[in-house]
Image (cartoon, grey):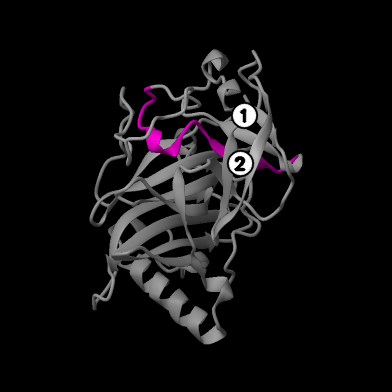
Amino acid sequence: MGYKLGGMAHLRWIKIVSAGLVTLVACRGEKPAEQRSSAVTPGDNGESSQIVAATPRWNTALGGALILPSSRAGDAKVWIIPPTYVEPVTDTGTFDVTGLARHPVDLFNRSGLVTSAMLASVRPPSDDACDDFPAGALSMARGGWTVALESGRATAVGLDSIEAMSPTDSAAFAAQITGLVSTLPETRDSVFSSVPFAVQGGYRFRTGELDVIIATVQRSIPSEANPRLDNTIVIAERPVGAPGAYQVGFVKRSAGAERDAGAVNPLAVVLLGSGRQPVVLVKYEYFDGITAGVIERIEPRHWVATWTSGSPGC
């Protein structure tokens, strides 16, 4: 049983309906949230970045952009994904990130805050709508970070990973995850009903009042003629110190042909505002690229994928 998303990078996420494949996306009994014309109320009353617009579902407490390391250019080179970079990706004039030039940023990973740096350069977006994300460079190169926000926007949360646990503890945690996922109606697909779940990633964290699990699991049918995959991410919670089972607050599933069933990679967990709202920052890995996403805890046992970026390229 593998614990990483190994071999799944660059698989297409949720774009398989037109091919007649089965895809199910569920947020614990809800339909996917529709794009709205106003921003989500931020978790704090501080001023937002000058480049934040009233973008559908973007929480302005996150600041002016999500910043990811560019896998093609090294740790100092970055992609800068503004809140306006959503599907359909057409008008690059709305992707101006020059207002972030010389801004300090905090670099996070699943262990918490890595360091702080400066956006030393920012590349204006190209007029070509098929271009990559807007880009830039940090003032210093340091590996090990997965996502960045404007400095002071968020408080880091360290995650306990299944990979760092003892063999006994990791096996017990994996069994807890697979037991939790197997009870969900969203995962009861007759095509995969006899296929066991394999834990790709398992994480635990605690806020002042919550114990939370984030897990990614996979089922596979390695047929030569038609290999198929089923990838699911689940977030579950319970009050600190409470007995009993975790309650699932979010589940998102993508199933289909191996080339088309996408993978999701949790990048970091942060707390926003004086209310310390938990937020999971994620990366969806496509066959031909990536998008970034934000999953927020809206109320007890209810997490919502409030914002997902568009995908660069044609």
| Magenta-span inclusion, residue 9 | no
Looking at the rendered structure, the kind of residue marked 2 is Leu
Secondary structure of the residue carrying tag 2 is: strand
Residue 71, numbered label: none
* Image-based side of 166 in relation to 45, left or right: right
The amino acid type of the residue labelled 1 equals Phe
Locate residue 42, reporting x and y percent.
33, 37
What is the residue that sits farthest to the bottom in this orientation?
168
Residues rendered magenta in the picture: 54-72
Q: Is residue 64 magenta?
A: yes
| Residue wearing tag 1 | 133
In the image, 242 versus 213, the foreground residue is: 242
Is 227 on the left-hand or right-hand side of 120?
left
Quick one: which residue is furthest to the right in this view? 73
Q: Earlier in the sequence, mark 2 or mark 1?
A: 2
| Label pair 2/1, CB-CB below 8 angstroms | yes
Q: Position of residue 240 (x, y in %)?
A: 28, 71
